[in-house]
Amino acid sequence: MADPLVTVTAYAAPGDAQLAKGVLDSAGIDNLVDDAVERRVKLRVQNVDAIRAGDVLTARCPSLSEIDEPDEDAAKPGCASCGSTEIVPSGRGRMFLLITAVAIALGVATGMSHGAFAAISMAAVLLLISGRWRCTFCGETWD
């Protein structure tokens, strides 16, 4: 199996999973039955065969009771520079609010509202350029 495996369905009974495996085998679809975890036996196929496998199981095994299974877990994002998974939001919104408050206060205090507007505009552009995520290990930022 070269493609990534995806869960097509899950069963509470291992016998049901083995029956479904036999149906997919007879249809020529490579598949794998995972070991039972928390009373769930997952039936997995290659990503390219997932839709066809679902159609085959629906057509040939309508009486098997399936367990509602969440989608595959998304891969945890990581830093492209160092590979660390310890990432946090960069805090762009809070920084923009702070700069805006200071610029407005200074603009009102000095009577230079145009200067305050320019400062807020420059802060918005600079913060939009900066990344949304920051690696706590190496400090790299990205969107």
Image (tube, rainbow, N blue to C red):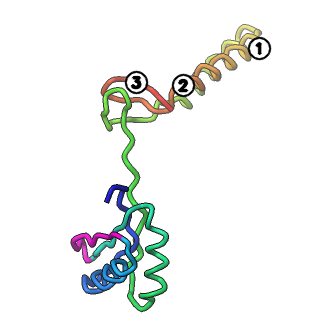
Residue at which label 1 appears: 113
37 is higher (above) or lower (below) than 92: below
The residue nearer to you, when weighing 111 against 126, is 126
Identify the main secondary structure in magenta. Answer: loop
Which residue bears the numbered disc 2?
Answer: 95
Q: Which residue is mark 3?
A: 140
Q: Are marks 2 and 3 in contact (CB under 8 Å)?
A: no
Disc with the residue nearer the chain's start (2 vs 3): 2
> Is 4 on the left-hand or right-hand side of 103?
left
Q: CA distance from mark 2 to mark 3?
A: 17 Å
Q: Residues within 10 Å of mark 1 (few under 14, many from 20)?
A: some
Position of residue 120 measured from the top left corner of the image (x, y, whole percent): 67, 19
Q: Residue at x 63, y 22 (%)?
A: 101
Q: Is residue 48 magenta?
A: no
Marks 2 and 1, how far apart at CA = 20 Å
Three-letter code, disc 1:
Ser
Q: Which span of residues is magenta-colored?
A: 30-39
Can residue 104 be seen by looking at this rendering? no
Q: Secondary structure at mark 1?
A: helix
Quadrant including the N terminus: bottom left
